[in-house]
Image (spheres, rainbow, N blue to C red):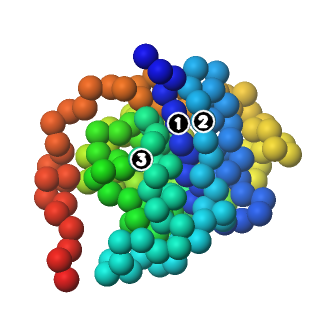
């Protein structure tokens, strides 16, 4: 069996992004578990707002290729207005069943304030509608600025949780998928 390839998609455009730092730690866990890793920094992609009349826009074909080539994907987002970032939503809109169907997905959310659970719930719903297998273990990082000491996660417990997300992405990358979810069967897309 080949090494599982884990791709982490960073839904933050900030130069000093706690989401990106946390995803780097998750990828450290994936690497330690024997996987190969790749960080998708959406700052490096030209992704105009999706216009469904066009198959490809900007660097969308490259993003789709990278996500499609992954055995597992970790989605990372800052919390904006109780949900995940528009940057991540736009990137996910370029992808679909071909890239996410029957694929293992891990979730990570960071918040400047309170617990970022709703962003994780929203991402879980999207991934289920794409017929992904979403890891039960997810990472929520509230009050994230106090969670880091420089580029390092300050708490051993939190660092272990973040690295476990990466390890789980490797361990369960080739899990036998369940039958399609109700959400994925109902998600046929818009025709207009």
Q: If the image is split into quadrants, where does the N terminus sit?
A: top left
Query: Which residue is rendered at x = 14% and y = 49% of the image?
Result: 182
Marked residue nearer the N-terminal end (3 or 2): 2
Q: Nearer the viewer, mark 1 or mark 3?
A: 3
Question: Where residue 9 sits: x, y (%)?
Answer: 55, 51
The answer to whether 105 is drawn above or below residue 48 in the figure is above
Marked residue nearer the N-terminal end (1 or 3): 1
Question: Where residue 149 sits: x, y (%)?
Answer: 84, 43
In the picture of the structure, the residue carrying the numbered disc 3 is 68
Contact? badges 1 and 3 (CB < 8 Å): no
Query: Which residue is rendered at x = 36% and y = 78% of the image?
Result: 54
List the single residue furthest toward the right.
150
Q: Tell me if 38 is positioned left or right of 18 in this view.
A: left
- Secondary structure at numbered mark 3: helix
List the single residue furthest toward the top.
1
Q: Tell me if 132 is positioned left or right of 144 in this view.
A: left
Q: Which mark is residue 6?
A: 1
Disc tally is 3
Q: Is residue 136 visible?
A: yes
Q: If the image is split into quadrants, where does the C terminus sit?
A: bottom left
């Amino acid at each position: 069996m080949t090494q599982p390839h884990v791709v982490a998609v960073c839904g933050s455009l900030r130069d000093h992004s706690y989401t990106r730092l946390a995803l780097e730690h998750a990828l450290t866990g994936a690497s330690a578990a024997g996987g190969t890793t790749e960080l998708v920094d959406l700052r490096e992609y030209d992704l105009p707002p999706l216009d469904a009349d066009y198959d490809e826009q900007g660097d969308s074909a490259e993003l789709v290729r990278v996500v499609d080539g992954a055995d597992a994907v970790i989605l990372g987002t800052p919390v904006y207005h109780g949900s995940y970032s528009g940057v991540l939503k736009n990137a996910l809109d370029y992808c679909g069943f071909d890239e996410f169907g029957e694929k293992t997905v891990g979730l990570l959310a960071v918040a400047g304030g309170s617990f970022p659970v709703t962003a994780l719930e929203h991402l879980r719903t999207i991934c289920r509608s794409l017929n992904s297998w979403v890891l039960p273990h997810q990472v929520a990082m509230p009050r994230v600025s106090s969670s880091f000491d420089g580029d390092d996660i300050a708490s051993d417990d939190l660092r272990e949780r973040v690295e476990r997300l990466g390890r789980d992405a490797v361990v369960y990358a080739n899990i036998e998928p369940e039958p399609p979810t109700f959400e994925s069967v109902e998600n046929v897309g818009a025709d207009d």
